[in-house]
Image (cartoon, rainbow, N blue to C red):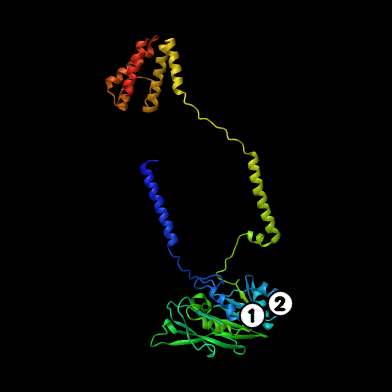
Amino acid sequence: MDKRSKIILGIFIAVLVGIMATEIVRPKPLNWSPSYTSSDKIPFGCYVLHQELKELFPNQKIFSTNQSLYNVLTHRDSSKASSYLIINDILDLDKQESNQLLNYVYQGNDSFIAATNFGSILSDTLNLRVETMYTLSEDTLQIRLSNPRLSNKTYPLARGAYNAHFTSVDSLNTTILGNITYSSEDQPLKSEKQHTITSPNFIKVKFGKGNFYLNSTPQTFTNYYMLRGNENYVSSSLSYLRNVDLYWDNYKKSGRKIIDSPMRFVLNQTSLKWAYYLGISGILLFVIFKAKREQRIIPIIRPLQNSSIEFAKTVGGLYYEYRDYTDLIYKKINFFLEHIRSNYHINTVILDDKTVRDLSAKTGKPIAETKALIDLLIQLKNKKQHSEQDLINLEKKLNKLKH
């Protein structure tokens, strides 16, 4: 490798190392996507709330479940009362899950759900409607609990919160626990001539022997607002739940990582998982021992020697020993004519004045010199016997034309 190549390679490596160092040192951009999972520490995750559940419910057992609501409620101990806590931007329950949750609450348990949409089956059964109004301006939403003994403070929703509120509820079975205040026509609440609207965003719906606690602003329960002074609102809202076992739903989450690989089923079954591991281990052992047993010594293959020079010397020695000048002259003439045809694309069937002009034009040699060579070729081709001097003259003429 020459000096220039080494310099270029060094510059390339330095630039590559610089890019890698910049990517490592550069702070990662903040992820504002909704997650609501207990493990996410991003603004709209629920890591802080999940860690504080033991403080909020010190005498209760807290079960964090990663299974579907249907499986959890089907296999639970129905002899014990409990509460089910679900927090997500949208609650998407199928028919079986909705019926199982309704039956769970009807039997005397409670469910606390914070979402901007509660699904069609649940909404129709509880006779409620939720409206979501999207706005581009910030600092236009404020929430407040109705019970002043719990919290007499107004909490602003500054970022990432939607104006979701209840527009229709079952007045016979519903108690309003909190409200959301927003300005009309995107007019900021801090404006002097503001026109504000207050609608319920936190309600209690009695269903059978149990209760549904529904909150339409789930963003309030995320890390971002828990660390910005809204922790009292969260603790006051969850204080309505009874002192019973609590299920934290970690399945119905927007940020839950889903594995779509077909191997998911295999690895979730104990027998199939061990069969898969044993199969992979057996194949690896077979490859290792099979390759070790059949590996042979690689022979050294020497490169072929270039014997062209020795061959030329041998042939030349034979011609010199037998003094066959005629045969040698014929071969030189044929070789030269083949050279003209291949390199200059000149017809050599008939050697005439046209051949002389074409060869002179393409080689750049004078016409007289070229004509002398062609005449010599014609003379030697017509001659039956040749002498050593004829061979020498031909060789001189050919070398002069080529060089």
Return the x and y of residue 99 as percentages of the image width and height. Answer: 67, 77
Q: Quadrant of the N terminus?
A: top left
Counting residues from the N terminus, which is met first, the one under dot 2 or under dot 1? 1
| 187 left or right, relative to 129 | left
Residue 185, how many percent across, how many down? 43, 82
Closer to the camera in the image, 383 or 100: 100
Q: Which mark is residue 77?
A: 2
Q: Residues within 10 Å of mark 2 (few under 14, many from 20)?
A: few
> Residue 178, position in %: x, y?
53, 86
Which amino acid does the dot numbered 1 rest on?
Gln
Tell me the residue that label 1 is attached to: 60
Task: Tell me: residue 34, above or below residue 363.
Answer: below
Q: Is residue 187 left or right of residue 213?
A: left
Question: Quick check: 169 above or below 92?
Answer: below
Please give the name of the residue rendered at 56% of the width and 87% of the height, measured from the top-left corner: 177
Which amino acid, mark 2?
Answer: Asp
Q: CA distance from mark 2 to mark 1?
A: 15 Å
Q: Is residue 39 left or right of residue 98?
A: left
Q: Is residue 119 visible?
A: no
Identity of the residue drawn at 29% across and 26% down: 364
Which-is-in-front pick, marks 2 and 1?
1
